[in-house]
Amino acid sequence: MMRENRANVYRITSLAIMSAIIYVITMFRFPFLGSKVHLANSMCLVSGMLFGPLWGGIAAGFGSALYDALAGGYDPVNVLITFVSKFAMASLCGFMVSRSRKQSVPLVIVSSIAGAVLYVALYMIKTFVYQRFVYGFPMDAVGATMVSKLIPSLINALAAVITAPIFYHAVLPAMRHSGILEKVSGRS
């Protein structure tokens, strides 16, 4: 019982720290090719890889939704959509990584790609639904808006796919050595 309580304390603390990291890193955006690149999606993927599909997804969703609610100025529906889409991205990536005992570079890259593509797809679905059914725009305007949002989304997805494996493999040895990885994800 004591061991389980200690594991829960490690898990909750680690998830709170990861949520805070995601919140803060979302604030930093860099202009690139007419868009703004941020590494929040990268940290969401890392969250899934480190903490697994459930807990990593919760940390990713919570950190991103918290940013949208407090700093992004979004309404509760958009905050919930952010939580769900970031949870799904981290969860898929974390599920793929957790299925293997060996977190090889190719596996981590493929998992990052899958998570990033899922997020872009969910974001584009949200854009379509809002543009077409909530705002009632005609299809040609919806198409133009979707293209204008797809390009920055793909740039951010590419940035996440490049940086997430680097960040993950940078922190993985320290988390394994300290025993935190086993406590928060159930892996060794």
Image: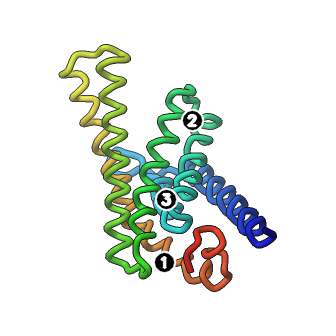
Mark earlier in primary sequence (1, 2) = 2
Q: Which of marks 2 and 3 is in front?
A: 3
Circle 3 sits on which residue? 53
- Residue 82 position, x and y percent, is 49, 39
Which residue lies at the image location 44% right of the left edge and 43% below the top edge?
85
Secondary element under disc 2, as helix, strand or loop, is: loop
Nearer-the-camera pick, 30 or 96? 96
Q: In which quarter of the image is residue 127?
A: top left
Q: Which colour scheme is used?
A: rainbow
User: Which of the 4 image quadrants contains residue 184?
Assistant: bottom right
Mark 3: amino acid: Pro
Q: Which of marks 2 and 3 is nearer the N terminus?
A: 3
User: Which is nearer the N-term, disc 3 or disc 1?
Assistant: 3
Question: In this rendering, is residue 119 above or below 186?
Answer: above
From the viewer's perspective, is 28 left or right of 102? right
Dot 1, crowdedness within 10 Å: few (<14), some or many (≥20)? Answer: some
**Which label is found at residue 122?**
none
Please identify the residue farthest to the front as the structure is shown: 1
Amino acid type of the residue tagged 2 in the rendering: Gly
Which residue lies most toward the bottom here? 177
Mark pair 3, 1: CA separation: 18 Å
Task: Report the quarter where the C terminus lies.
Answer: bottom right
Q: In which quarter of the image is the N terminus?
A: bottom right
Q: Name the residue under label 1.
A: 169
Measure the C-alpha gap from mark 1 to mark 2. Answer: 30 Å
Q: Which amino acid does the dot numbered 1 rest on?
A: His
Q: Is mark 3 on a helix, strand or loop?
A: helix
Give the residue at mark 2.
72
Q: Mark 3 and mark 2 in contact (Cβ < 8 Å)?
A: no
Task: Work out how far the residue at label 2 is from the one at label 3, CA to CA, in angstroms.
Answer: 26 Å
